[in-house]
Image (tube, rainbow, N blue to C red):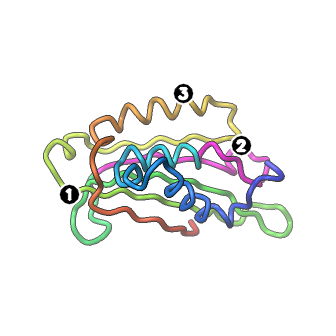
């Protein structure tokens, strides 16, 4: 979508959403981070017109990415990066990871992932509603860690 923010500014946009809630205590819960991610996910960026050039990924599971097992909710935005000829070069992902101490009820959730692409003419609000249902057991919890980062993939 032309005239939106550039994908290079996406991490700063996500950070701004995380502090834009009604109070500083809101962002400290899963619900606060989820509301920030929904605001961020609704914002359109200046991306190529391909149907997979701007995507949202919701995923969770128990992983040991940081060295010890943690239940992790991954809220990710992925942008296609094209070369000077307009051809696909790579993707850049902006991540908000919420990590929780392992507990049997969280481990029982298993793992899950789902993509949404802005260019696919799908219902964003419907996708958000389905993903939020998956978050119900976590909405009022405080993550032990929140990590924001960007990486090429």
Start and end of the magenta stretch? 41-61
Q: Which mark is residue 60?
A: none
Q: Is residue 95 left or right of residue 59?
A: right
Residue 101, label in figure: 1
Residue 27 at x, y percent in the picture: 41, 53
Residue 99 left/right relative to 94: left
Q: In whole angstroms, how far apart are the C-alphas of marks 2 and 3? A: 18 Å
Q: Secondary structure at mark 1?
A: loop
Q: Work out whether mark 1 precedes mark 2 in sequence or the reverse, and give the earlier one.
A: 2
Residue 50 located within the stretch drawn in magenta: yes
Residue found at x 33% / y 41%: 139
Q: Nearer the viewer, residue 51 or 129?
A: 129
Q: Dot 2 corresponds to which residue? A: 51
The 10 Å Cα crowd at callout 1, few under 14, some 14 to 19, many 20 or more, is some
Q: Earlier in the sequence, mark 2 or mark 3?
A: 2
Q: Measured from the top left, where is residue 56 in percent x and y?
A: 56, 47
Residue visible at 83% across and 53% down? 3
Tell me the crowding category of disc 2: few under 14, some 14 to 19, or many 20 or more residues within 10 angstroms, Cα based.
few
Q: Earlier in the sequence, mark 1 or mark 3?
A: 1
On residue 126, which mark appears? 3
């Amino acid at each position: 979508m032309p005239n939106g923010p550039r994908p290079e500014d996406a991490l700063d946009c996500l950070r701004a959403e995380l502090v834009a809630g009604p109070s500083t205590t809101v962002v400290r819960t899963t619900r606060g981070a989820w509301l920030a991610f929904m605001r961020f996910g609704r914002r359109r960026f200046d991306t190529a017109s391909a149907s997979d050039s701007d995507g949202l990924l919701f995923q969770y599971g128990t992983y040991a990415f940081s060295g010890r097992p943690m239940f992790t909710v991954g809220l990710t935005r992925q942008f296609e990066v094209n070369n000077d000829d307009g051809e696909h070069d790579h993707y850049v992902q902006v991540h908000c990871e919420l990590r929780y101490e392992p507990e049997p009820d969280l481990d029982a959730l298993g793992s899950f992932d789902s993509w949404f692409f802005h260019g696919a003419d799908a219902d964003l609000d419907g996708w958000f509603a389905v993903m939020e249902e998956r978050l119900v057991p976590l909405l009022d919890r405080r993550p032990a860690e929140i990590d924001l980062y960007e990486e090429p993939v």
